[in-house]
Structures are given as structure tokens and as C-alpha cells.
């Protein structure tokens, strides 16, 4: 199987030794996204703005890979404060429709750039 690297300027550039996404066959592995504005690379303020930006960033990478968030089969959400889990659920309703992807929500001690939320995903396109 060939491995393709996915990259878009509509999501934040990688800030480490990783790719925005990697496609192998029909499966695309989307790297974790935090609430960074792709133009300025600044972290947005507040949990609400960060949650929206995280899903906007994931959407941009999914589209660059030839898919959409409707193709996501697994989503992982990382929160510094699990009290914000209900907000994530509420925002997800505007990005995902039923049947929803499988999901894990994990409380973490910290995230890159002191972000409050991060999400990564696996999607299946084509085939």
C-alpha cells in the first residue's frame, strides 16, 4: 500500500515532527488538532472558540484528503477539563450527523500550547 501525506494551508501547519494527515489505502489518519488559527498560528481564547476551531481544522484536513467529516469513523477528544465535555457534544452536532463516529473522550493534564481541547480522527474515503 502506498502512503500519502496530506497537507493544507486551511489548517495549522504541523508544529512538530508529524504530518497533518497520512492516507494509506482508503484510510486517513488525521493528526490531533488544537484551536490554532491557521493564518496566524495563534491559539484562540476560551473553550468555546477552541472547540469550534478544532473541528474547523479537522474538517479542512479531511477535505484536503478527499473526504469530509461524514467519512470519520473514529474520533478522539482530549480535554484538560472534562467539565467541558457537554460543550464538545453540543458543537459536534453542527459538524457530524447520525450515524456518529465512534468516539473516546479523555481527560488530560495538559496539551500543546496550553490548549484546552484537542481532537484527532480516522476516516475512510473511497472504496
Image (cartoon, grey):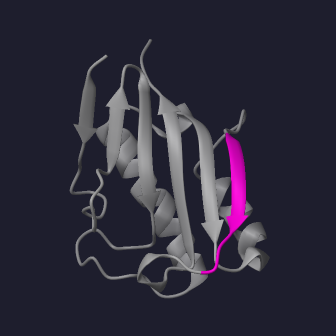
Q: Main secondary structure of the magenta part?
A: strand
Quadrant location of the C terminus?
top left
Rendering coords of residue 23 (x, y %): 34, 31
- The answer to whether residue 98 is left or right of residue 39 is right
Confirm whether the magenta stretch covers residue 106: yes
Picture residue at 63% right of the left edge, 80% below the top: 109
For this rendering, which residue is in front, 77 or 125? 77
- The answer to whether residue 93 is left or right of residue 53 is right
Specify start and end residues of the magenta stretch as a single range: 102-109
Report the label total.
Answer: 0
Picture residue at 23% right of the left edge, 47% below the top: 7
Quadrant location of the N terminus?
top left
- Relative to 71, does residue 30 appear above or below in the rendering? below
Rendering coords of residue 24 (x, y %): 36, 26
For this rendering, which residue is in front, 58 or 32? 32
Picture residue at 43% right of the left edge, 82% below the top: 44
Q: Where is residue 90, by image quadrant?
A: bottom right
Q: Where is residue 65, by image quadrant?
A: top left
Amino acid at each position: 500500500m502506498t502512503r500519502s501525506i496530506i497537507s493544507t494551508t486551511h489548517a495549522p501547519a504541523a508544529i512538530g515532527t508529524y504530518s497533518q494527515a497520512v492516507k494509506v489505502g482508503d484510510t486517513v489518519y488525521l493528526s490531533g488538532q488544537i484551536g490554532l488559527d491557521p493564518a496566524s498560528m495563534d491559539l484562540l481564547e476560551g473553550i468555546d472558540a477552541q472547540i469550534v476551531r478544532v473541528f474547523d481544522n479537522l474538517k479542512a484536513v479531511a477535505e484536503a484528503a478527499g473526504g469530509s467529516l461524514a467519512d470519520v469513523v473514529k474520533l478522539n477528544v482530549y480535554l484538560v477539563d472534562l467539565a467541558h465535555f457537554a460543550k464538545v457534544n453540543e458543537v459536534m452536532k453542527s459538524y457530524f450527523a447520525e450515524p456518529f463516529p465512534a468516539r473516546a473522550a479523555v481527560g488530560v493534564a495538559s496539551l500543546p500550547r496550553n490548549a484546552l481541547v484537542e481532537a484527532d480522527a480516522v476516516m475512510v474515503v473511497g472504496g
